Image: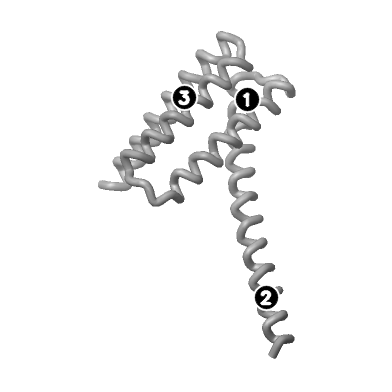
Amino acid sequence: MTQLFKSLTVVFAALFFSCASNAQDKTTQADTKITDRLKSQLNLTDVHYNKSYNINLEFIKKAKEVKDSPAGRREKMGVLKEADAKRDAAMKEILTDKQYRLFLEKKTENRKKMREAIKQRRG
């Protein structure tokens, strides 16, 4: 009986760590995709790329945390706005003025596209 218990414990532990690893991979993939897009749009140097990667990673982690939280919609939006403002401030510190203006323009364009896509899905 104890051998069965040990075996089940090992299986459950493996499943748990597999799921956690998969979630981390998705976060890293999203961050890489966003940062790669920024690199091409803003002509980021390798130093800027690495810094923006870390900024985006923190933002995506916070967004996922908010999404998975039991908080209400309004509270979630407030937390996301705060995280977005923090991300913008961090990006402003590492980008040139021209790059930062372009970053904000692209962000506005992406939000418009996202809103349109949501409207189309809703019908």
Percent x, y of residue 64: 50, 45
| Alpha carbon distance from label 1 to label 2 | 47 Å
The residue carrying mark 3 is 85
Q: Which mark is nearer the camera, 1 or 2? A: 2
Which of the two discs, 3 and 1, labels the residue nearer the N terminus?
1
Percent x, y of residue 29: 62, 44
Q: Amino acid at mark 2?
A: Thr
The residue carrying mark 2 is 9
Tell me which corner region of the image, top left, top right, bottom left or bottom right, holds residue 18.
Answer: bottom right
Is 18 in front, or is 111? 18
Q: Amino acid at mark 3?
A: Ala
Percent x, y of residue 117: 36, 40
In the drawing, what numbered circle is on residue 40?
Answer: 1
Marks 1 and 2 close (CB-CB < 8 Å): no
Q: Amino acid at mark 1?
A: Ser
Q: Which mark is nearer the camera, 3 or 1? A: 3
| Alpha carbon distance from label 2 to label 3 | 43 Å
Mark 2: secondary structure: helix
Q: Which mark is nearer the camera, 2 or 3? A: 2
Which of the two discs, 1 and 2, labels the residue nearer the N terminus?
2
The residue depicted at 54 percent of the width and 34 percent of the height is 59
Q: Label 3 crowding class (10 Å Cα cut-off): few <14, some 14-19, many 20+?
A: few
**Is 39 left or right of 87, judged from the image as shown?**
right
